[in-house]
Each structure stands twice: as structure tokens, then as C-alpha cells.
Image (tube, helix red, strand yellow):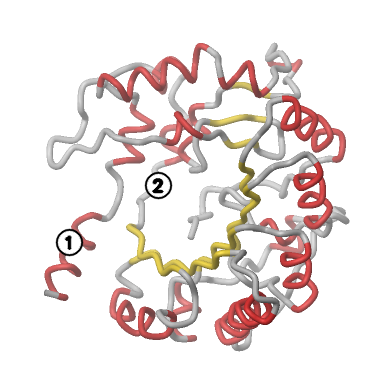
């Protein structure tokens, strides 16, 4: 689950030229794994199956996606199987329709957000949303098993919050003999806008721990992955916080004097290596400290205590 209250402006969609540029570089550098969906809903993209076809054609071994399950209809399930998608992670966060409505509120402005964009599809449904998603997931499992396939691995997740913590056991019971994995996650309090107002120097600067209790300073994301957004910006992880630590832009932003830079250059560049060194020393910038220490750990600990 990804909070979206900080998102502003119309939805941006990756263009064909950028897709071609990315896949050319993926092929040149033997990319082993490709994740679709980093805080966005990848199955809204009408030609998502063509992306999977491209990935398979250049030998990417692990093509996986994060989705809320809304678009896992019969046609999409067939495309997932046909294109050998290796993992499907579905964020649900509730075990009953009532709680799902509280957690997963409908975006009333979605029509306006994607106005004029023909590459995206939407579903305007309010009734029985959770029931339909659960049915989609079960039918994907059935389709995979009917073909005697081991992939895709299917995971459902539940971001624990005050509004849904009472449904943890029910969620587990509901899915433990259905999917391959069940994951319960800590919810994070995002301070994205406040951090975005800081200068780049202030965001990147190494700092002593700003959190005194149970200080967290470990993250392996900058060592194994990077995220590319539709505007061409590249960040060192898949979180929204990471957008405050932009490594560069594969298209460049001429009006800001930012040159186009290849993924390989960014992956081996000064900024990402500075970030890796911060994690090695434990002296992190304010963005990473905020991200790692903004989890609702106390809520999680209380739940664990109650379950004992």
C-alpha cells in the first residue's frame, strides 16, 4: 500500500521513446530483474503486456509486478501467464469490505487526473470492490495451477494500521491456504512535502542520528535497485521518499540545466556511491533517516504483544 495524499497534478505516463531507450540499456547491461509498479498501478497501462514481451525478448529473468488487484480480470490473468510474469504482489490491507473501504478510498478525481491520456484505463466501481479483487486473485491461482506452472509466485500484503489491525488474524486465515506468501507490513508516516522544501544540499548532507529511540540505519535498496519514474527521474529506491534524493534524469531537464544521463552512469555515479557510503558509516541524510524511522513501530509492537 502506498499513501497518495502528497501527489499533485495530472498523472504522468511513460512515453514510447523513453521505453525504447530504457529497454535498449536493459539489454546492453543484461538486466536480471524488472519490477513494474513503484507506488503506482501498472495494470492501468493498457499496453503492459507489450512491456512484458519486450522484457522476455531481451532475456530479463525476473519480471514482477505490484498491483492492487483491481485489473486482474480474465484477460489480464491470461496475459500474465502467457508472458511468464514471475511474481505478482497484491496489496489488499483488509479482510472485510467495510475495512477495505476505509483503507482503500476511491480517487474521485481520477477522471480529471488522466484526462486526454489514452494509454491508461480506469474502472469506476464502488460496490463489492474487495470481493471482486479476492475473486481475481483466486482465479489467477487457479489458472496457474491448472497449467501445472510454478510461476508466478503470488503474494498478498496487509499494511497494518489502526483502522485494520483488528483484522490481522482474519486476513491470515483467509489467505494462508490460497496464495504462496502473506506479508504483514509496517505503515509509514510520510513527511514528503516537508523534505521536498529543503535544498538539495540539506537533503543529501550526512547527519548524526535525528532519532534517539531505536534508531534504524540499515537499508539495502541503493545496493541492488533503482527506480525510474515516468518523467525520466531516477531514484535509489522504490519509495516516495526517494524522490527527494533524485540521482538524475535519463531524459535530462534542459530548462534546469540537468543533462540526460544513462542508467549505467547513474548506477555508478557520485550520488549513489555517496548514499551507499552513508549506509556503510551509519551517518545518513535526513531523507533516509525520516523514511527508516517513520514506521509505526509502536503500533506493530503492541499488536505482537497482544498476539502472545
Rendered image quadrant of residue 25: top right
Instruction: Say which of 302 and 35 sits in front.
Output: 35
Q: CA distance from mark 1 to mark 2?
A: 20 Å
Are the two marked residues, 1 and 2, in contact with CB atoms closer than 8 angstroms? no
Q: Residue furthest front?
A: 148
The image position of residue 146, as x and y in percent, is 67, 82
Compared to 133, does 274 lie above or below? Answer: above
Which of pointers 1 and 2 lies earlier in the amino acid sequence?
A: 2
Please give left or right for residue 186 compared with residue 274 in the image: left
Tell me which residue sits at (44%, 68%) in the image: 181
Residue 119 sits in which quadrant? bottom right
Q: Residue at x 30, y 50 (%)?
A: 295
Give residue 301's mark.
1
Left or right, residue 279 beside residue 255: left
Q: Which residue is mark 2?
A: 190
Q: Secondary structure at mark 2?
A: loop
Amino acid at each position: 500500500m502506498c499513501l497518495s495524499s502528497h501527489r499533485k497534478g495530472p498523472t504522468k505516463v511513460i512515453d514510447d521513446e523513453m521505453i525504447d531507450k530504457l529497454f535498449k540499456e536493459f539489454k546492453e547491461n543484461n538486466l536480471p530483474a524488472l519490477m513494474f509498479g513503484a507506488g503506482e498501478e501498472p495494470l492501468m497501462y493498457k499496453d503492459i503486456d507489450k512491456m512484458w514481451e519486450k522484457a522476455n525478448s531481451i532475456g530479463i529473468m525476473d519480471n514482477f509486478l505490484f498491483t492492487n488487484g483491481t485489473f486482474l480480470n480474465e484477460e489480464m490473468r491470461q496475459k500474465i501467464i502467457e508472458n511468464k510474469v514471475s511474481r505478482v504482489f497484491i496489496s489488499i490491507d483488509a479482510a472485510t469490505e467495510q475495512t477495505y473501504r476505509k483503507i482503500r478510498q476511491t480517487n474521485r478525481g481520477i477522471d480529471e487526473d488522466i484526462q486526454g491520456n489514452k494509454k491508461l484505463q480506469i474502472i469506476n466501481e464502488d460496490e463489492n470492490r474487495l470481493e471482486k479483487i479476492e475473486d481475481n486473485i483466486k482465479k489467477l491461482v487457479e489458472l496457474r495451477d491448472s497449467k501445472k506452472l510454478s510461476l508466478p509466485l503470488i503474494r498478498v500484503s496487509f499494511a497494518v494500521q489502526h483502522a485494520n489491525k483488528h483484522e490481522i488474524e482474519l486476513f491470515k486465515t483467509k489467505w494462508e491456504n490460497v496464495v504462496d506468501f502473506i506479508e504483514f507490513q509496517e505503515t509509514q508516516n510520510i513527511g514528503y512535502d516537508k523534505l521536498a522544501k529543503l535544498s538539495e544540499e540539506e537533503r543529501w548532507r550526512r547527519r548524526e542520528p535525528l532519532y534517539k529511540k531505536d534508531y534504524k540505519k540499515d537499508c539495502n535498496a541503493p545496493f541492488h535497485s533503482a527506480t525510474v519514474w515516468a518523467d525520466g527521474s531516477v531514484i535509489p529506491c522504490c519509495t516516495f521518499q526517494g524522490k527527494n534524493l533524485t540521482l538524475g534524469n535519463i531524459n535530462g531537464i534542459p530548462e534546469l540545466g540537468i543533462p540526460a544521463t544513462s542508467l549505467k552512469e547513474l548506477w555508478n555515479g557520485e550520488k549513489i556511491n555517496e548514499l551507499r557510503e552513508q549506509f556503510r558509516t551509519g551517518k545518513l541524510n535526513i531523507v533516509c533517516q525520516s523514511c527508516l524511522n517513520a514506521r509505526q513501530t509502536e503500533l506493530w509492537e503492541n499488536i505482537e504483544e497482544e498476539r502472545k
